[in-house]
Every structure is written in C-alpha cells, then in structure tokens.
Amino acid sequence: MEAQNYGNHRKWVPLYHFIAAALVLVFFGASIWRLIKQPSLGQTINLGMAAGLVLVFFYARATALVVQDRVIRLEERLRLRELAGADLTSRIDEFTTDQLIGLRFATDEELPGLARKVIDESITGRDAIKKMVQNWRPDHARA
C-alpha cells in the first residue's frame, strides 16, 4: 500500500462514491423529468421512491461516519491513557471528538506532545491537527 499522509488519507470507495452515487442521482433526476413530462400518480410515487433512495444513500454514509467517529474517539482516549503522562491523562475528557480524530494519525511517540499542544492551544479543527502530524500513522481500516 502507498504510504499514507494528509494529502491521500481520505478513503474513496469507487463503487459507492462514483458509480452508486451517479446511479442514484440519475434515477432521481430522471424521476423529476418524467413527472414533469408525464404527470401521474405513478410518476409521483416513482419520484417519492427516488427521493427515498437518495436519503437512504446519504444517511447510510453519514451513519457509518458517526459510528466511525465514536470508535476513533474511544480508541484515542484509550491510547492517550496508555501513552500520556499523568498531567495529560487527567485532561482526556477535555478533548473534543474532532481533536481526537485529528490526533489519530500521530504515531505513539508523537501523540503525547502533539496532544498537549492541541489541548493547551485549543486547536480544534481536524484538518489543522492532521497537518501538524509529523510522523503519519496510517489508518487503512476506515469506513
């Protein structure tokens, strides 16, 4: 696998992000078009089904990402308890989910120092924290 870094860490699933998304959106657009051209109860139901499919498509992804974020939050809290000194361990509950998600890419050696900097300087953005990571710890098991 290619070495992971800030520039390439986002996961794209081609069948989901490109093929399935395109099919769902084309079906939704075609349903709108057919309802405009041939208004009927059947076309209205078809548009409702297409809209429902769009909602399921986006909420399925959003739900998976929320669950992933919760798992990352738990994993990083456990990792901080194991790797950080007493001063930082007592502050683990102060970290936001976004901060913990940003920190997940820091190696074990880099994590305590970076975590102190993040919490002391109130750095909150995931991307800002990810950009601060010097030694990238890859995560290939993402949703």
Image (spheres, rainbow, N blue to C red):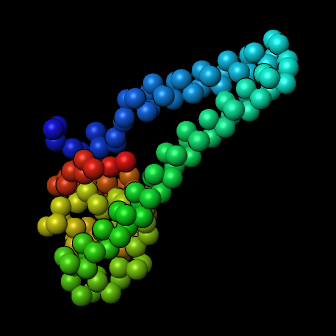
Outermost residue toward the front in this view:
42
Above-or-below relation of 65 to 15: below
Residue 52 percent location from the top left of the image: 67, 37
Q: Which of 9 and 16 is in front in this view?
A: 16
Q: Nearer the viewer, residue 123 or 60?
A: 60
Outermost residue toward the right in this view:
40
Residue 137 percent location from the top left of the image: 19, 55
The residue at the point 81 percent across, 16 percent down is: 36
Q: Is residue 17 left or right of residue 108?
A: right
Q: Is residue 23 left or right of residue 131?
A: right
| One can see residue 49 in this view | yes
| Total residue callouts | 0
The residue at the point 16 percent across, 37 percent down is: 2
Q: Is residue 45 left or right of residue 122?
A: right
The residue at the point 45 percent across, 51 percent down is: 64
Image quadrant holding the N terminus, namely top left
Outermost residue toward the top in this view:
37
Q: Nearer the viewer, residue 81 or 41?
A: 41
Above-or-below relation of 42 to 51: above
Quadrant of residue 74 in the image? bottom left
